[in-house]
Image (tube, rainbow, N blue to C red):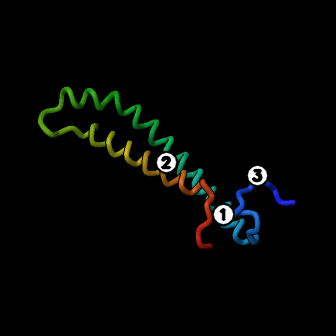
Amino acid sequence: MANMNIPAAERNLSPAQVAALDKRRQWGLVFQVIAGQFGFFAILLLLWTGQDLTYSPGWVHPMFYFNVLTGLVAVIFGVYGTYLRRGKLHEY
């Protein structure tokens, strides 16, 4: 009897396809961890960003730009990591 915990599309994979799927899910987890680390640093940068926006003159706000960049990288890595972890079949 088939394992009903596995999605229907993944029940009849060859060993090579299973290995490729596992590798893809491992990379997805790595990207999610990187996203969490960038998210943590983005939260820490908020302290300096507020001070930077308050005291820096004109358009010179380097900490604000670093914080925006860090937040965007966290979101991008998180979305792509989640996409890889889903396990939907690609062309192997």
User: Nearer the viewer's eye, disc 3 or disc 2?
Assistant: 3
For label 1, the residue is 21
Q: Position of residue 91 (x, y in %)?
A: 59, 72
For label 3, the residue is 5
Identified by mark 2, the residue type is: Gly
Name which residue lies at 31% across and 30% down: 48
Left or right of 40 on screen, residue 11: right
Query: Where, quadrant-wise, is the C terminus in this rendering?
Result: bottom right
- Mark 2 residue element: helix
Name which residue lies at 17% across and 39% down: 60
Question: Relative to 29, does residue 42 appear above or below in the rendering?
Answer: above
Query: Where, quadrant-wise, is the N terminus in this rendering?
Result: bottom right
Question: Relative to 17, does residue 76 appear above or below in the rendering?
Answer: above
Q: Position of residue 33 (x, y in %)?
A: 55, 45
Left or right of 55 on screen, residue 26: right
- Mark 3 residue element: loop
* Label whose residue precedes the other's in the sequence (3 or 2): 3
